[in-house]
Image: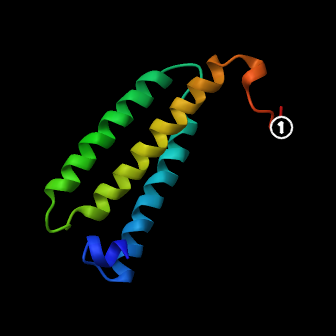
């Protein structure tokens, strides 16, 4: 429905674009493994959140949607890197009795 009614796309094109978003998310998650968990998380979270806003603005300006797959890869990467970094900050700074027990620790 969204692909057809909003983006005026067929199902295969819409699925390709969703795949691009997923690929970016995967790259963002893998890229965070290279970051020292004790440093730079606030900068990473803030920087990627700001880049997500910029990417959204660029996507809005791309009326023919020619650059949309590339922008969606970057959006997925930024979204995942920002949210995972913010979650790590919260987990580090939260009171231990407020953290959710996962059974892994």
| Up-down relation of residue 28 to residue 70 (above or below) | above
* Picture quadrant where residue 21 is located: bottom left
| Secondary element at tag 1 | loop
> In terms of depth relative to the viewer, which is nearer, 85 or 57?
57
Rendering coords of residue 40 (x, y %): 48, 21
Location of residue 49 in the rendering, given as x and y in whole percent from the top left corner: 37, 35
Where 66 sits versus 83, above or below?
A: below
- Colour scheme of the picture: rainbow
Determine whether 70 is above or below 30 in the image.
Answer: below
Q: Is residue 86 left or right of residue 60?
A: right
Q: Position of residue 46 (x, y in %)?
A: 39, 28
Residue at 36 percent across and 68 percent down: it is: 17
Q: Residue at (73%, 27%) from the top-left corner?
A: 99
The residue that mark 1 highlights is: 104
Q: Quadrant of residue 52?
A: top left
Q: Above or below — where is 98 with respect to 32?
A: above
Q: Is residue 94 left or right of residue 8?
A: right
Instruction: Answer with left or right where residue 8 lies relative to residue 49.
Output: left
- Quick one: 63 or 5, which is closer to the camera? 5
Q: For label 1, count other residues whose C-alpha is less than 10 Å away and answer few (under 14), some (14-19) or many (20+).
A: few
**Count of marks overlaid on the render:** 1
Quadrant for the C terminus, please: top right
Quadrant placement of the N terminus: bottom left
Q: Residue at x 50, y 42 (%)?
A: 31
Residue in the image at 73% along x and 23% along y: 98
Q: Please provide percent x and percent y for residue 29.
A: 54, 45
Quarter assignment of residue 50: top left
């Amino acid at each position: 429905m969204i692909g057809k009614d909003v983006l005026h796309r067929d199902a295969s094109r819409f699925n390709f674009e969703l795949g691009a978003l997923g690929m970016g998310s995967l790259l963002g998650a893998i890229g965070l493994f290279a970051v020292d968990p004790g440093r730079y998380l606030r900068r990473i979270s803030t920087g990627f959140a700001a880049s997500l806003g910029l990417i959204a603005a660029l996507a809005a300006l791309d009326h023919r949607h020619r650059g949309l797959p590339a922008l969606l890869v970057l959006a997925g990467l930024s979204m995942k890197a920002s949210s995972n970094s913010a979650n790590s900050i919260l987990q580090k700074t939260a009171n231990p009795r407020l953290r959710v027990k996962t059974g892994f620790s």
